[in-house]
Image: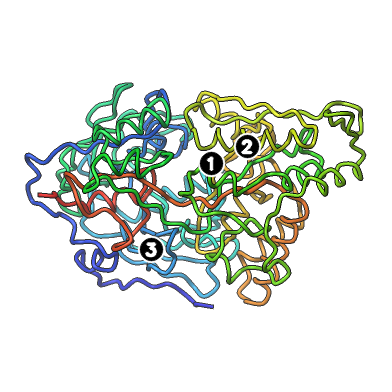
Amino acid sequence: MKKRILAATALGLAAVFAISGCSNPGNSSDNTGNPVLTIGMPNGTQTENHNPFVNTSSAQSLGYAFAIYEPLVQVNPTNPAIKPVPWLASAYEWNTDYSQITFTARDGVKWSDGKDFTAADIAFTLNLLKDNPAANLNALPFDTITTDGNKVVVKFTSGQFTNQYKAMNLFVVPEHLWKDVADITTDLNPKPVGTGPYTLKSWTPQAATLVANPNYWGGTPAAPELRYSSYTNNDALTTALATGEVQWGWTFIADIDTVYVSKDPANNKFWAPAGLGVDALFLNTTTKPFNNAAVRQALNLVVDRQVIQQQATSGVFPPLENVTGMPLPAGDNYLASAYKGDNYAVDVTKAKQILADAGYTLNGDVLSDPDGQPVTFTLTNPAGWNDYLTELQIVADAAKQLGISATVEAANVDAWFNDIGNGNFQASMHWTDSGPTPWDMYSDIADGAKLFPIGEKANWNFGRYDNAELTKALETYATTTDEAERQAAIEKVQQIFVTDVPAIPVVTRPAAAEYSTKNYIGWPDDSNPYNQPQPTGPQASQILINLKPAK
């Protein structure tokens, strides 16, 4: 096992960006005259909320939170081989069992209101997460957080081998402003102050407008102004991207070469680096019909993933083939030998037998549960999310083969985010994180450490799957320093996942984005994969400061 990750404490700013594969920040000392950069997401009507701790806020939904607030370290979840880049922390060091990390606060950084950024801000932010589980989206088990000069020592109650990227990629807020906030999960943060390359200028329902931070520690960003807009659905954003109205965003585009790339082949770019994340059908395991494993197992056997990959993603997303739900070849090193070569295959006959053995009866074309009630369920995702809605319809059609009546409903995006978080759904497509190991994927779907009661907001394990053996195996994998024990734990996770079906993975989920090189170059791509390309994550500040004028 690699014992630790260590960033040299003497790294200068130019060296930091050399490590990342980026050009030196501050590409231009004067960005006057450079065009506005427009960024779009298909997330429907937004209400003004600049809270970076709330994943349903407009700041998070559209991504501008990450142009204002920056992470301690930049990590690349789609390519773990790329060394993490020190950011607000100029250095970091893990101990050998990953139960402690020491951050060194970067010198010379100021908040956008002119106050100095210090180690105290880092410690304060991490203590906020420790004291507010609803904001601690990754369920990091903080123990003690202390400062010593410009260093912050963070101890965890267990080893964080699998969470090392998440612990390093946390953003920081200013203590002098947030110390007086009564509830960090509900505050609207009307005047956001960050360390990032941009500050908020104005907000309307049509656009959030940001301008370059004149005192940014990383230099002057090339784009003088950013405009973030939310479009009603995938189609509306597709049109905006194809016409150049939007130059950076992410939406699924069927037949992307024809619909988007061909409109400006020299500049319209699409990049979709894949890792160990998936799209999965999350199932509410607390209520009928998915509180019975037989229904989950049967549905899993009739979903045709090849049809989903071809029809719902137009063949753009890599197919998902192995029964463990783990993307291959990215997961080859973690795959249990028992499942090598064991691929998904539609088997309606076997699915019907599983249901019959569990006491379900098929009368004509109607399946009844052991209580004599017809088996039905509703599949929901936001209106306009065409790839997901297509996937849901394919699942509904598959369920019909078993005598199950499934209905697809298109929801308001805000209502959907709230409903899936609170457990108010039966079945819904959602992505998982990618990470350096498959732990993130499995944990996001089924980890009891992320379990919240129905009605309380969950950030993962939306289906409220509760299996003590699986939760223990995930914990062991995350905390042990013994490689053999770690492999045994991930194989136990796979075995439970295959047999009990907490959710139904359907396709590999790349971190994809569309962007234009007409006005700005320096985007991450195959030739320079310094980070994943989406605008809605901590990597945004790294991408924005790496951009240069195209001419």
Q: Quadrant of residue 328?
A: bottom right
Amino acid type, mark 2: Ile
- Give the labeled residue for mark 3: 103
Disc marking residue 311:
1
Q: Earlier in the sequence, mark 2 or mark 3?
A: 3
Q: Mark 3 and 1 residues: CB-CB less than 8 Å, in contact?
A: no
Residue plotted at (78% across, 34% down): 289
- Look at discs 3 and 1 and give the one toward the viewer: 1
Structural crowding at the residue carrying mark 3, measured as other residues with C-alpha within 10 Å and reported as few (<14), some (14–19) or many (≥20): many
Callout 1 secondary element: helix
Residue 146, image x, y percentages: 44, 59
Residue drawn at point x = 55 percent, y = 61 percent: 156
CB under 8 Å between discs 1 and 2? yes
Question: Of the numbered discs in the image, which one, if any, rests on residue 394?
Answer: 2
Which x, y percent locates residue 347?
76, 49
**In this picture, is 265 found above or below 477?**
above
- Image-quadrant location for residue 234: top left
